[in-house]
Image: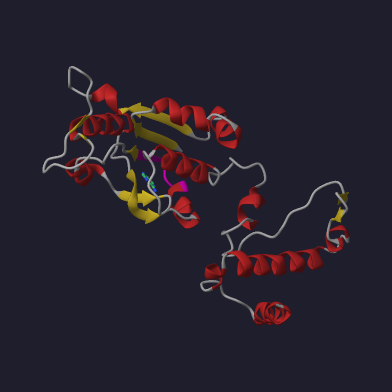
Amino acid sequence: MKFYVLTLFPEMIIDALSNSIVGRAMDKGQIELIPVNIRDYTLDKHKKVDDYPYGGGAGMVMQAQPIYDAYQHICEEAGHKVHCVYLTPQGRTFQQKIAHEYALMEDVCLLCGHYEGIDERVLEEIVDDYISIGDYVLTGGELGAMVLIDAISRLVPGVLHNDDSASTESFEQGLLEYPQYSRPETWNNRKVPAILLSGDHAKVDQWRHEKSLERTLERRPDLLESYELTEADKKYLKELDNCN
Ligand code: ADE
């Protein structure tokens, strides 16, 4: 999968994503990261990419021309209209299910804004989706783009070593993931739950499922509203409720 990133800070994207799992996926050619510096496309002799807002007001607005030309260059290189996402607090909130939608695509272009925003006309011309990474305002779209690239890349087939690990984790089943333990069996006087050492896979699965329910109830009860509880789940949650 190819990620084109339209940005004024291309080195920020490369530096942050060259390590760990995403870096390895790039080395293996499973994903490709192509930052495109918007400033390289300005026709202004001083390399300016922003100007004052019409109608007045604080801050500067990123101009349409350099963004449009940089995007056209990307589409020419790709040989088709590349799906374009503008990172903005005004977008739909990014979620695991959106990461899955995007992981199916061949390529995507992530547009990062700065200053007070981008001239609306170029957004109308090129943007296919508006995505926010949460209800807060960042200084630019780059961190949002990196969040999307990280979350989407790990769903691209082959990127994670163990294919199971993506399907059991938080959000994939609509619940938060159960707690995990590794060696040693006792650390700081704390023991690993005995059931995990029993070798009884059915019991381990049941224990993990119950812990997922318990944790979701405690930390993200809103998720339970859209999760289809079995009769056994309901009974377990009721027991938990009686204990509290
Ligand atoms: N740019 C500024 N704030 C943002 C946010 N919350 N999500 C995505 N892009 C942004």
Horizontal arrangement in the rendering, residue 78 relative to residue 157 (left or right): left
User: Residue most toward the left?
Assistant: 55
Q: How many labels does the image show?
A: 0
Q: Position of residue 114 (x, y in %)?
A: 31, 36
Horizontal arrangement in the rendering, residue 56 relative to residue 186 (left or right): left
Horizontal arrangement in the rendering, residue 66 relative to residue 214 (left or right): left
Whether 29 is drawn above or below 101: the answer is above
Residue 51 placement: quadrant: top left
Residue appearing at x 24%, y 33% in the figure = 67
Horizontal arrangement in the rendering, residue 163 relative to residue 3 (left or right): right
User: Residue most toward the top?
Assistant: 45
Whether 59 is drawn above or below 191: the answer is above
Front in this rendered view, residue 164 or 9: 9
Q: Where is residue 169 in the image (x, y as percent from the top left)?
A: 63, 55
Whether 235 is drawn above or below 174: the answer is below
Residue 144 placement: quadrant: top left
Residue appearing at x 29%, y 34% in the figure = 75
Q: Position of residue 43 (x, y in %)?
A: 18, 22
Q: How is the image coloured?
A: secondary structure
Residue appearing at x 36%, y 56% in the figure = 92
| Magenta-drawn stretch contains 66 | no
Q: Where is residue 99 in the image (x, y as percent from the top left)?
A: 47, 51
Quadrant where the image shows the C terminus: bottom right
Residue appearing at x 43%, y 50% in the figure = 133
Whether 27 is drawn above or below 53: the answer is above
User: Residue most toward the front?
Assistant: 58
| Magenta-drawn stretch contains 108 | yes
Front in this rendered view, residue 193 or 33: 193
Residue 24 placement: quadrant: top right
The magenta stretch spans which residues?
A: 103-110
